[in-house]
């Protein structure tokens, strides 16, 4: 459970790859402050594509996407949704993580 958005951000420790293309962030706590949702908005399609490429390369190369403040904490990235400008769903991927924490595959 998180105390606040600042607490969630600090405890999760997003790495610099999430800053690619300088997105605008919309941050929300859900599920009685157990789920931290971050929406990324971009100034252009090119910025969004550059961000997606950086994230894809990180996931498939050396997935260092989070550095929790407390190394005994676990961070779970379990869903990615791409939205249209009007907020409707464009694409959704649910992830399944293995115990290694590095193997990532879309859920069936």
Image: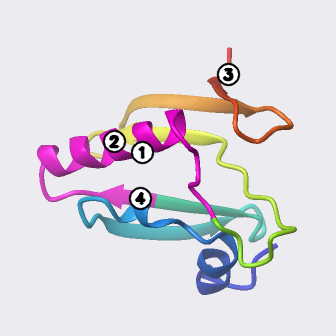
Circle 3 packing at 10 Å, graded few (<14), some (14-19), many (20+), is few
Q: Are marks 3 and 4 in contact (CB under 8 Å)?
A: no
> Disc 1 to disc 4, how far (Cα)?
7 Å
Q: Which mark is residue 52?
A: 2
> Disc 3 to disc 4, how far (Cα)?
24 Å
Q: Is residue 52 left or right of residue 80?
A: left
Q: Secondary structure at mark 1?
A: helix
Q: Are marks 1 and 4 in contact (CB under 8 Å)?
A: yes
> Disc 2 to disc 3, how far (Cα)?
19 Å
Q: Which mark is residue 17?
A: 4
Q: Is residue 66 left or right of residue 60?
A: right
Residue 85 seen anywhere in this rendered image of the structure: no
Q: Nearer the viewer, mark 4 or mark 2?
A: 4
Q: Secondary structure at mark 4?
A: helix
Whether 65 is among the magenta residues is yes
Q: Quadrant of residue 3?
A: bottom right
Q: Which residues are magenta?
A: 39-66
Q: Earlier in the sequence, mark 4 or mark 2?
A: 4
**Residue located beneath label 3 in the image:** 107
Residue 12 seen anywhere in this rendered image of the structure: yes
* Rendered position, 107 above or below 59: above
Q: Is residue 77 left or right of residue 85?
A: right
Q: Residue furthest top?
A: 108
> Disc 4 to disc 2, how far (Cα)?
10 Å
Q: Earlier in the sequence, mark 2 or mark 3?
A: 2
Q: Are marks 1 and 2 in contact (CB under 8 Å)?
A: yes
- Residue positioned 23% across, 46% down in the render: 50
- Residue positioned 61% across, 61% down in the render: 66
> Disc 1 to disc 2, how far (Cα)?
5 Å
Q: Nearer the viewer, residue 55 or 76?
A: 55
Q: Nearer the viewer, residue 66 or 76?
A: 66
């Amino acid at each position: 459970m998180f105390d606040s958005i600042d607490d969630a951000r600090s405890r999760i420790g997003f790495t610099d790859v999430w800053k690619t293309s300088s997105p605008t962030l919309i941050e929300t706590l859900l599920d009685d402050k157990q789920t931290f949702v971050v929406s990324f908005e971009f100034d252009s399609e090119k910025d969004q594509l550059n961000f997606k490429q950086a994230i894809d390369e990180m996931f498939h190369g050396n997935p260092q996407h989070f550095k929790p403040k407390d190394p005994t904490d676990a961070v779970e990235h379990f869903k990615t949704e791409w939205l249209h400008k009007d907020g409707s769903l464009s694409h959704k991927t649910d992830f399944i993580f293995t115990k290694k924490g590095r193997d990532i595959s879309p859920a069936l």
